[in-house]
Amino acid sequence: MLNRDIKRNDPRFIKTIGKLVAAHLLESNTIKPFKGNVTLQDALWAGQFEPRILELIPAIMLKKKNLFQLKGLCPEDLADVIKRVVHGEEAIPFRSVEPRLYLRWVERVGHKGKSPALLKTFRFSNEDVKLLNELKSKTALKEIEIIRTALELFYQKANYRI
Amino acid sequence: MLKKLFKDLDNWTQKTNKELIKETLPTIKPFYIKVLGQTALIESKIKLNLFSTMDMDMYSDCNYLVKKELERLLSKHKKFLDGFSNEIWMPKETEYELFYEGKVLKAYLAKAEYVLISKALKAPEKNKNIIQEYLSKQPSELFIKLAKKYKVDLKVFHNAK
């Protein structure tokens, strides 16, 4: 049996994957959902052999803290990654995972679409405000939703995806 | 799940087109979806131990309205569209197998060998387990040919721990 297979047959690996499958965060064609307890330490251990686990861990720690049991202190590198996300500081790789790969799960895990909001201040002209109010009454959307939709449309257009 | 989802998307597009016709507006043109990545591997029923995050990678020429509806349908299954799909590299000769054919939508799965070579070349560390497992099960001639063409050093996977 290969070293890889021994690690992947370890109960810590199977339970971690099963827990993530049960939480609808991973899909597996071989491991069934597991609803028992899994510690963060075991999940981090399993993450060495399946980077997709590591991609999810920062988001889980931010948005679904109770998914994994925390025994003792949160590892320093993970705590640093989380602190940077919360404070909107420059993100750093988490073990082998580059920031864009774990950051995309922050909005998607737990309450969907919620990520630690960052404050940005802009000055709008009277025309902008008038336009925003008009769109608000026409669409019944909140101001921030209108701005997000506009940004998304602009992004799509800039990428020739419309 | 994916076939049913594509059927729902096709039905929705047809219904939307009927409404657009009534209002004498331009209709949504026929479009394609090419499923890539782990989702393509899982749906192809390849015999590998696969783990996939809940995002779907695809190439598509669908318009914004269709994309939004697809996102809504995926979210019912706790899934998402990968925002970086258009950055995914696939060999230019990739073969896609017809997976679903509706009135307006044609959906395809990227053939497993092309998905695997893309993974081996562009994200070897992340995908080393899948590639190792695949190599241990007699890889196809097509995969070996692609590995040679794209200079993927398969020894790296044989030697990886």
Image (spheres, coloured by chain):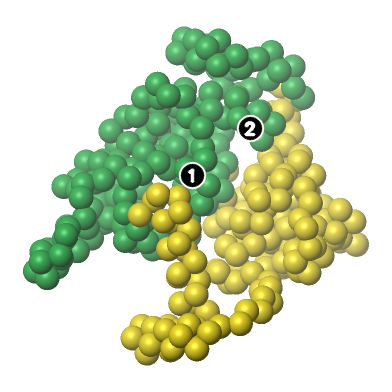
Q: How far apart are marks 1 and 2 (CA)?
A: 14 Å
**Could you say which is closer to the camera, residue B147 or residue B99?**
B147
Question: Dot 2 lies on which element?
Answer: loop
**Could you say which is closer to the camera, residue A36 or residue B5?**
B5
The yellow chain is A
- Which residue was labeled with disc 1? B85
Placement of the N terminus of chain A among the 4 image quadrants: top right
- Does residue A22 appear in this view? no
| Chain on which label 2 sits | B
Indicate which disc residue B123 carries: 2
For residue B132, which quarter of the picture? Answer: top right
Percent of width and height locating residue A47: 73, 44
Q: Residue at x 75, y 50 (%)?
A: A43
Q: Which residue is drawn at 48% across and 82% down?
A: A128
Q: Which residue is drawn at 74% across and 17% down?
A: B159
Q: What residue type is labelled 2?
A: Ala
Q: In this view, does A55 lie above or below A129?
A: above
Question: Dot 1 lies on which element?
Answer: helix
Q: Residue at x 74, y 22 (%)?
A: B160
Percent of width and height locating residue B60: 36, 44
Mark 1 or 2: the one toward you:
1
- Does residue A57 appear in this view? yes
For marks 1 and 2 on the same chain, the one whose residue lies earlier in the sequence: 1
Q: In this view, does B94 lie above or below B82?
A: above
Q: Colour of chain B?
A: green
Percent of width and height locating residue A144: 52, 79
Q: What residue type is labelled 1?
A: Ser
